[in-house]
Amino acid sequence: MLQRIQTIYLLIALVSAGVLPFVFPLWTTASGNGFMFMENLGYIVLFGLSATLSLVSIVSFKKRKSQFVMGRLNIILNLILLGLFIFRSLNLSGETDKDLVISEKGIGMLLPIVSIVFLSLANKAIKKDEDLVKSVDRLR
């Protein structure tokens, strides 16, 4: 059913992976320009896959087991994306310019963390629904 709490959690994860990367830059370069995710093909693919998995998971509300598996895959995908951001931020921190302009990390680097939190909450709610259905089946 679409009115379940996991749908709201998955919708927030969809927004954080599909909409917010267009708004927030991942980091600010030494020249002062914001680096958006659209400038790197790898980030485009990973954010796109994460948003697609969230959308497919919302639509497949009748198949709780596959919804749960898609949530776990989405969490793994966001962990990979977070790992790439951490690797990039470790390489970014030592960058300086002649005018002492230092690159800064942006709020866009935290978007996978938001997605992971809400996907975990959605998986917890899906598991709770699955346990409820199994307990009702035992009574029959």
Image: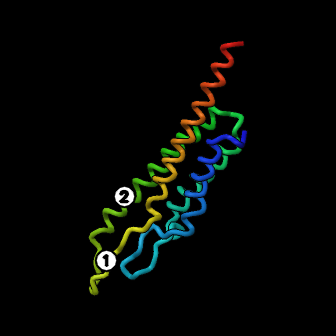
Q: Calculate the distance from the C-alpha at mark 2 to the C-alpha at mark 1.
A: 17 Å
Per the rendering, the mark at residue 102 is 1
Colouring convention used in this rendered image of the protein: rainbow
* Residue at the (66%, 49%) spot, across then down: 55
Q: Is residue 76 left or right of residue 137?
A: left
User: Image quadrant for the C terminus?
Assistant: top right
* Residue at the (27%, 85%) spot, across then down: 98
- x, y percent for residue 83: 40, 53
Q: Is residue 15 above or below residue 30?
A: above
- x, y percent for residue 7: 65, 45
* Residue at the (63%, 25%) spot, across then down: 132
The amino acid pointed to by label 2 is Ile
**Residue at mark 2:** 86
Kind of element beneath mark 2: helix
Is the C-beta separation of discs 2 and 1 under 8 Å?
no
* Residue at the (60%, 53%) spot, across then down: 14
Q: Is residue 24 left or right of residue 28?
A: right
Q: Is residue 6 left or right of residue 110?
A: right
Total labels: the figure holds: 2
- Return the residue nearer the eye: 45 or 53: 53
User: Image quadrant for the N terminus?
Assistant: top right
- x, y percent for residue 122: 57, 41
How many C-alpha atoms fall within 10 Å of the one at disc 1: few (<14), some, or many (≥20)?
some
Per the rendering, the mark at residue 120 is none
Kind of element beneath mark 1: loop
